[in-house]
Amino acid sequence: MTLARQLELSRFQRALEVTESLAANRALLTTMELERINSIITGKTDPIWRLGPVTLTLPGGKTETLALISDPKITARDHLHVATESSENGHPVEAAIQIYAEFVLSHVFADGNRRTAVAAAHYFFKRYDVPISGLALHEIGLGDLREKDVRESLKDTVMQIVRFAGKR
């Protein structure tokens, strides 16, 4: 493992610890906390939010350009609000998957979007006592999350992991 990869993994693990602490203290995951988590993950402090269009390479190798988001911080806040409501209504797994997919798809951060999305999902898993780690979510291979069947497959996989973890 390269030194750069070790540093990336160390930062990611630290971000997961921060989300666990927030969850254990029943603190809300806010955009301010997301900024801090993203800074830990990327090692950067400025700019955190994506300020322009971005071209991505999708899992299948296809490239796509995402348009400018008028206010990525408000977009993130809205995603967090929906996920928190869903969790409070008894659906924390769905909320974690939703927040993960929305952050990956909207690409609100300048860098580290998938890892930050995993950290946010990890928060919902830990806060609502779902026996799965965000690290497990990070290890699941992805397709194009814009496709409904891919999201459903992700949800099914996570539910199977949760059931298996609950039996231990």
Image (tube, rainbow, N blue to C red):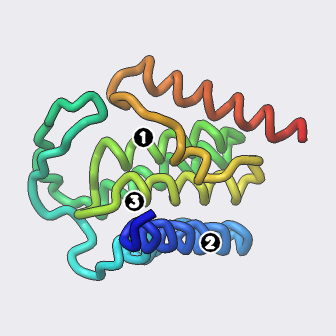
Q: Are marks 3 and 2 in contact (CB under 8 Å)?
A: no
In the picture as drawn, the residue positioned furthest to the front comes out as 1
Q: CA distance from mark 3 to mark 2?
A: 21 Å
Pointer 1: what residue?
101
Of tags 3 and 2, which is closer to the observer?
2
Q: CA distance from mark 3 to mark 1?
A: 15 Å
Dot 2 amino acid type:
Glu
Q: What is the number of the mark on residue 12?
A: none
Left or right relative to 153: residue 47: left
Q: Residue at x 61, y 25 (%)?
A: 156
Of tags 3 and 1, which is closer to the observer?
1
Left or right relative to 40: residue 67: left
Of tags 2 and 1, which is closer to the observer?
2
Dot 3 amino acid type:
Arg
On the question of residue 18 being in view, the answer is yes
Check disc 1 and report its element: helix, strand or loop: helix
Pointer 3: what residue?
77
Pointer 2: what residue?
17
Relative image position of residue 45 (x, y in whole percent): 29, 82
Relative image position of residue 157 (x, y in whole percent): 61, 28
Left or right relative to 19: residue 25: right
Q: Residue at x 27, y 28 (%)?
A: 60
Dot 1 amino acid type:
Ala
Q: Which of the two labelled residues, at mark 3 and mark 1, occupies the earlier sequence position? A: 3
